[in-house]
Amino acid sequence: MTRTSDPLSLSLRLKDATYTLHENLDKGIMAHGLFSSADKYKSFVTLQYLFHRDANALYNHSQLLEIIPDLAARNRFAHVCQDMQDLGLTFPDDEKPIENLDASTAVGWLYVAEGSKLGANFLTKLVEKLGFTDTFGARHLAADPAGRGASWNAFKSAIDHAGFDPVLATTGARAGFMRVKNYLTTPSVLLSLSA
Ligand code: HEM
């Protein structure tokens, strides 16, 4: 029997624990109109850059690589760097890397990064209208090669059956969402907004 979402699975716990944070973040992003023009979309790409830059090292977490063998290939940091270049954006230098985390907390952070690829399905349709695609400007929003659903289910299945500490993982997921939320009002993101 395949158990990808039993009632007490880690992925469902994380979804429940971050539901409001995700809703508030979505609303904040949409309220800023980040998909209403090419210039405003630059703020979204900068926001994504900052988060994926900070999360970059987690995709090489040695313990997690044993549990999620394709972890490194899931990393979108290189794609978002290319998007920054496509859009002629300056790379912010206020680096705050997430490093040396225990595996459970790290998985919470990765839940945020990997889950964001689901919402990206909807966002690609908005940015296509602005002229950005998976080969220019919106590379980081593209689906994983296996497809969004299959890739997400594989990630959930891996984290649901590995015995992670749910309290630590929840702390990591909440911290991940808070990091993105805080970046939404950081000067390098707001700068593109006022352009
Ligand atoms: C960088 C910002 C964002 C992050 C970090 C993020 C994170 C996540 C996460 C972790 C999930 C998985 C929830 C779960 O099923 O456990 C998710 C799903 C989803 N997100 Fe976001 N999200 C972001 C922005 C957005 C935005 C702006 C929208 C649209 C307004 C959006 C719409 C959705 C939708 C519709 C789903 C569910 C898709 C499905 O179940 O097929 N997200 N997101």
Image (cartoon, helix red, strand yellow):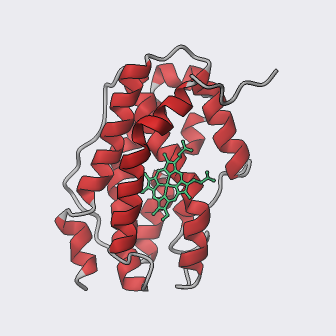
State the residue at coordinates (66%, 51%): 144
Viewed as shown, does residue 57 lie left or right of 96? right
Q: Is residue 88 visible?
A: no
x and y, in percent, of residue 103 in the image: 42, 21
In terms of image quadrants, where is residue 143? bottom right
Q: Is residue 34 above or below residue 111?
A: below
Q: Nearer the viewer, residue 164 or 140?
A: 164
User: Is the C terminus in the top left, top right, bottom left or bottom right quadrant?
Assistant: bottom left
User: Is the N terminus in the top left, top right, bottom left or bottom right quadrant?
Assistant: top right
State the residue at coordinates (41%, 61%): 26
Q: Is residue 173 visible?
A: yes
In terms of image quadrants, where is residue 175? top left
State the residue at coordinates (65%, 25%): 6
x and y, in percent, of residue 114 in the image: 53, 44
Viewed as shown, does residue 186 lie left or right of 174? left
Viewed as shown, does residue 170 lie left or right of 134? left
x and y, in percent, of residue 154 in the image: 68, 35
State the residue at coordinates (57%, 44%): 74
Farthest top residue?
A: 163
Viewed as shown, does residue 190 lie left or right of 24? left
x and y, in percent, of residue 146 in the image: 74, 47
Q: Is residue 21 above or below residue 138?
A: above
